[in-house]
Amino acid sequence: MRRREFIGAMYVAAGALVSAAADQQPGKVWRIGHVLTLTPEIGAMFAQALEQSLADLGYVQGRNIVLLHRFAGPQPDKIEEAIRSLVPQVDLLVVWGEGAIAAKKLAVGVPTVFISIGYPVELGLVQSLAHPGGNMTGITAEAALETPAKLQILKEIVPELKRVAVLGPVDDPAFVEKGLQGLAARELGITLVPVVIKSADDLEAAFTSMKKDGAQAVMPIRSSPTFVLGKEIADLALAAHLASCWPFRQAVMAGGLVSLGWTMNSVNSSTALPTSIDDKIIKGRSAQGRRRPRVRHRLRAPADSRNRRARRRPCTWRQNQRTSRPCR
């Protein structure tokens, strides 16, 4: 999926889980809280994307919805503060990344749409991907296939690669990915060196620690702090002569070496997924995952059958399910 299509895809599913509760309560002005784990400078484009995607569904800021944006940055205490302040005054909450963890704790009873967080089932946010249950649903960014591929890329860049620093924030909620990282590293004969930071002030010490531990490359994890501090981390990796493999394309644009993963700053409201989710919530429809359509097959009857219907050609299932016809 191209970069101009992804966030749009996320935003028309949170706006259709927001147009599915206006039909239930016509005339109601819905108040929607939007918590971004980014700075205002970086997050402004995402706020505008949500407004545009909702407007395309008929929800106009100041007319039939009130959007309350909060740019909390990557600090956990700021994220919790933003959610805590919004909960009493909103009908629906849209949260990014690690904000989903805080929303699970603080926004009980408020319909919540999360965007861009991996492993929501393992983190206890939802019961399952198909049937979330509770008050939360949204868009997940699974990274199960990213880690092995990123290590393989680094191995190709540095053939003698033996030690890779994994850079992430302290108390990173995406702890479930660590097992996958370790398994992939063992298969490639690589030792992972975990390095944690709290803020930008810790970066220089973090890279000093990497070099001391013999790291030959660095792999920042997908998190709000590593996204916000992408340029600073890329510059330090370059100065330390460490190959870097990122989960964000933006970091490569800022000076990082290579990236693998979907991109965050794409806006295409025609396919925006989270806004379609928001839309469903407002209209009171189910925002749970759709079941795959059941495929019916009719087998050919034995050749000696007297039943004339048995000699008909077997039923086929066309690739385009919308235009397929049932067997007769």
Image (tube, grey):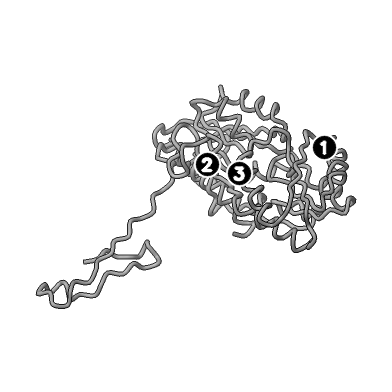
The residue singled out by tag 1 in the image is 200
Q: Is residue 294 left or right of residue 58?
A: left
> Can you say whether 220 is above or below 137 in the image?
below
Marks 1 and 2, how far apart at CA: 30 Å
**Badge 1 vs badge 3, beta-carbon distance below 8 Å:** no
Tell me the amino acid under the disc marked 3: Ser
The residue singled out by tag 3 in the image is 116
Tell me the quadrant of the picture where the N terminus can be found. bottom right
Give the mark nearest the N terminus, 3 or 2: 3
Marks 3 and 2, how far apart at CA: 8 Å
The residue singled out by tag 2 in the image is 138
Q: What residue occupies the far left of the structure in this picture?
A: 306
Q: Residue at x 57, y 34 (%)?
A: 62
Q: Secondary structure at mark 1?
A: helix
Q: Residue at x 66, y 24 (%)?
A: 81
Instruction: Tell me the crowding category of disc 1: few under 14, some 14 to 19, or many 20 or more residues within 10 angstroms, Cα based.
Output: some
Q: Which mark is residue 130?
A: none
Q: Position of residue 228 (x, y in %)?
A: 75, 42
- 1 vs 2, front mark: 1
Q: Position of residue 261 (x, y in %)?
A: 65, 54
Q: Nearer the viewer, residue 215 or 306?
A: 215
Give the mark nearest the N terminus, 1 or 3: 3
Marks 1 and 3, how far apart at CA: 22 Å
Tell me the amino acid under the disc marked 1: Ala
Tell me the amino acid under the disc marked 2: Gly
Give the mark nearest the N terminus, 1 or 2: 2
Q: Residue at x 51, y 43 (%)?
A: 15
Q: Secondary structure at mark 3?
A: strand
Q: Position of residue 28 (x, y in %)?
A: 46, 30
> Can you say whether 22 is above or below 90 in the image?
below
Q: How many marks?
A: 3
Q: Secondary structure at mark 2?
A: strand
